[in-house]
Each structure stands twice: as structure tokens, then as C-alpha cells.
């Protein structure tokens, strides 16, 4: 059981060209991935990243994808008694952790992870492949941050409405000081138009005091993109 310490192995994002599964095996693969996605979203956020990768291949899963799924199931069996505990808090401050893993996928695209907590309770977890190719870790982090700015703002408004009270400005934590400089000071050179737009999008949100961006050391939120 020691080989199932983590949900995914180091070669998770390595795409191996192997024979596709038979039709009945494909249906089983798709069913298991859908069930595990439901489980990950509600009770096992540590599975989010692996499932976000496996669901990219549900149309044409291969033998290698099946092995990765079996590894995840082995981890689930080993940790089946692990619980997600939600503790009520009177403090409703919102914190979001956004991270990116540079050039994780075989097509050159990076991977984004986001975690939102209210008080000390984790309420939202997501891990997804980025939609564009970036040339540096800083730009990958900028894409991750800008892609989630609108969502965290909306989340803050929703919670304010539900609780019918004023909630402190939300904090977004980043482990890339270059990105923080770009969106707070406007320094550096971002030549691509779509990246400049992303930079100004975050800068505007900060200027309007919709959120603030703070630095956090990589090892304090490395779990968002485990094994990448």
C-alpha cells in the first residue's frame, strides 16, 4: 500500500501514446471518473488535481490513463477513513490561494490551482488546465490570478448578501513576487496584449479595493498543485 501515498504519481501529466481502451472499459473509466469528480468536489479536495487531468481523456482513454485511475483508486482505498471536517467560525474573512505550475502539460500549457477559505474552513477547491500557452512562470501565475479574480469577487459579494453583513476585503495570496509587482506597481514589461489586459484587470480590482494581493511562501500552499 506504500505506493499509494499520493493521489497521483510524478508522471501524472506525462501523456503516453498507448492503445485505447475497449468500449466497455471506456464506459467504466468514464463512470469512475465522474463519481470521483463528485467525491473530490465535496469531500476529497486532495483528489482534485488528478481528476482534473483524467477527465481530459474521457473521450479516448488509454491503458496508461487506466493505470493512473487505478492508482487514484488505490489511494482512495488506503485513505478511505480520512475525513473533511468543517468547523463553524464567527469570523467570516475570505482568503484565496492561487497558484500555477509552469508547463505541466505536454502541449506546453500550465496548470492552475485555487483554494478559497472562509475563516478557517475550506469552501472551494479547483484545479484546471490553463487555456493558453505562456512563456514563463511569471506569466503562468498572472494567467492563474487573472482567471480567478472575477470569481473571488463574486464569491465575496455572494457571501456578503447571504450573511447580510459587511465582510472584510478579501485577500488573495500569491507565491510569485514578480506577479505581485506587476499587479500592484505596474512594473515590468508585458508585451502580449492579452497579458497586459490581464495585468490591468487585477490592478483595477486592487485599485477599487475589491481585493488585496499578499505574498505567501511557496511551501505554505504547495499542496494546491501536489506532485507537479
Image (cartoon, rainbow, N blue to C red):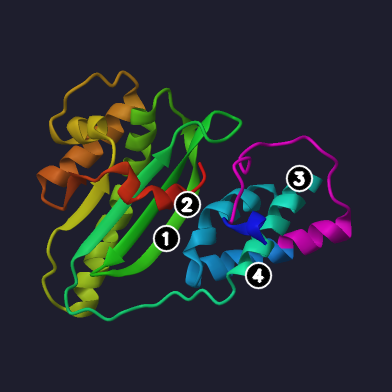
**Boundaries of the magenta span:** 7-30
The CA distance from mark 1 to mark 3 is: 26 Å
The CA distance from mark 2 to mark 3 is: 21 Å
Mark yes or no: residue 47 visible.
Answer: yes
Q: Is 99 in front, or is 220? A: 220
The CA distance from mark 1 to mark 2 is: 7 Å
Circle 4 SS class: helix
For label 1, the residue is 125
Q: Are marks 2 and 4 in contact (CB under 8 Å)?
A: no
Disc 1: CA contacts within 10 A as few (<14), some (14-19) or many (>=20): many
Q: Nearer the viewer, mark 4 or mark 3?
A: 4
Q: Earlier in the sequence, mark 1 or mark 3?
A: 3
Numbered label attached to residue 65: none
For label 2, the residue is 127
Q: Earlier in the sequence, mark 4 or mark 3?
A: 3
Q: Nearer the viewer, mark 2 or mark 3?
A: 3
Considering the whole magenta stretch, tell me its main secondary structure.
loop
The CA distance from mark 1 to mark 4 is: 22 Å
Across and down, in percent, residue 130 comes to: 48, 40
Disc 2: CA contacts within 10 A as few (<14), some (14-19) or many (>=20): many
Quadrant of the rendering where the N terminus is positioned: bottom right
Q: Nearer the viewer, mark 2 or mark 4?
A: 4
Q: Earlier in the sequence, mark 2 or mark 3?
A: 3
For label 3, the residue is 64
Circle 1 SS class: strand
Q: Are marks 1 and 2 in contact (CB under 8 Å)?
A: yes
Q: What residue is drawn where x is 40% and y is 40%? A: 100
For label 4, the residue is 77
Disc 4: CA contacts within 10 A as few (<14), some (14-19) or many (>=20): few
- Locate residue 84 relative to residue 119 in the image: left or right: right
Across and down, in percent, residue 159 comes to: 24, 71
Circle 2 SS class: strand
Amino acid at each position: 500500500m506504500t505506493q499509494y501515498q499520493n493521489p497521483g504519481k510524478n508522471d501524472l501529466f506525462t501523456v503516453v501514446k498507448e492503445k485505447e481502451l475497449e468500449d466497455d472499459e471506456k464506459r467504466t473509466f468514464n463512470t469512475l471518473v465522474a463519481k470521483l469528480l463528485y467525491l473530490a468536489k465535496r469531500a476529497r479536495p486532495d483528489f482534485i488535481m488528478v481528476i482534473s487531468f483524467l477527465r481530459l481523456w474521457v473521450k479516448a482513454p488509454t491503458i496508461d490513463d487506466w493505470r493512473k485511475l487505478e492508482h487514484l483508486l488505490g489511494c482512495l482505498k488506503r485513505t478511505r477513513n480520512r475525513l473533511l471536517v468543517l468547523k463553524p467560525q464567527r469570523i467570516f474573512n475570505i482568503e484565496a490561494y492561487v497558484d500555477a505550475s509552469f508547463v505541466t502539460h505536454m502541449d506546453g500549457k500550465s496548470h492552475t490551482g485555487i483554494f478559497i477559505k472562509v475563516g478557517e474552513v475550506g469552501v472551494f477547491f479547483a484545479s484546471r488546465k490553463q487555456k493558453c500557452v505562456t512563456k514563463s512562470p511569471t506569466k503562468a501565475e498572472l494567467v492563474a490570478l487573472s482567471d480567478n479574480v472575477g470569481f473571488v469577487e463574486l464569491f465575496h459579494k455572494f457571501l456578503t448578501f447571504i450573511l447580510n453583513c459587511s465582510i472584510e476585503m478579501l485577500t488573495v495570496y500569491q507565491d510569485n513576487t514578480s506577479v505581485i509587482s506587476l499587479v500592484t506597481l505596474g512594473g515590468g514589461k508585458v508585451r502580449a496584449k492579452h497579458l497586459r489586459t490581464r495585468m490591468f484587470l487585477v490592478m483595477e480590482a486592487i485599485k477599487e479595493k475589491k481585493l488585496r494581493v499578499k505574498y505567501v511562501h511557496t511551501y505554505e500552499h504547495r499542496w494546491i498543485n501536489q506532485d507537479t
